[in-house]
Image (cartoon, helix red, strand yellow):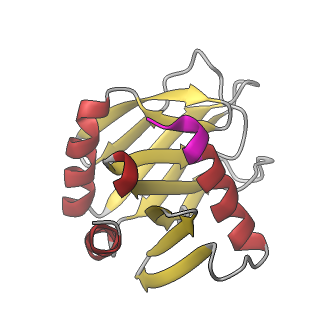
Amino acid sequence: MKISTLFTLLASATTLMITSLPVQALQLKETYKDWAVYVHEKDNNKTCFAISKPKDMAPKGVNRGDVFFYVSSWPGDKVSNEISIKIGYPLDADSAPSAIVGADQFNLFAEGDKAFIADETLEVNLVKAMKKGSTLVVKGRSKRGTTTIDKYSLAGISAALKRVSAECK
């Protein structure tokens, strides 16, 4: 997992949501229901990702930053469908965040305000579950002890991932 590249990408995507970046840096390719596909190209390196925001966040009124779920691909590094989540607050490093689709639960690990799949071999299974499911639930616990539950719609994820694959062959 290329954490430094991922952090750069996450920062770029978050910035795009707030301000506009030069078109050549980060491009919105298409929106598929509740998921959007972006392509970032710089110095002959290409990164593609599907991104979504939660439809519901609990508890209400908790002070949080931006919250996004990403599925990213870097063809130059032979990485595809890498899962990462920007939680919007510093996670308790000893906590065990999770992603849940239907009856399937996937353990994550915390790093700052982000979560990643703990077992990279399970990323394939999480992506398959997401394509079949309708809702994705992400649970996390802040350094202050607050447990959050974010619910994402999976409407459009299959089409978005197909586009990511086409863009980043």
Magenta run includes residue 80? no
Q: Is residue 22 left or right of residue 68?
A: right
Residue located at (47% from left, 36% from top): 116
Q: Is residue 43 left or right of residue 143?
A: left
Instruction: Give the extent of the magenta segment.
Output: 1-6
Place of residue 16 in the rendered image (x, y in percent of width and height, measured from the top left)? 70, 71
Place of residue 166 in the rendered image (x, y in percent of width and height, measured from the top left)? 27, 74
Q: Is residue 139 left or right of residue 32?
A: right
Q: Compare residues 66 and 3 and report the one nearer the observer.
A: 3
Quarter of the image that includes the N terminus: top left
Judge whether 49 appears above or below 112 on screen: below
Q: Compare residues 112 and 138 and report the one nearer the observer.
A: 112
Residue located at (29% from left, 64% from top): 134
Residue located at (38% from left, 46% from top): 77
Quarter of the image that includes the C terminus: bottom left
Task: Specify whether residue 148 is in view.
Answer: no
Magenta run includes residue 5? yes
Residue at the far top: name it: 94
Q: Is residue 8 left or right of residue 72?
A: right
Residue 66 picture quarter? bottom right
Task: Specify whether residue 87 is in view.
Answer: yes
Place of residue 26 in the rendered image (x, y in percent of width and height, measured from the top left)? 60, 73
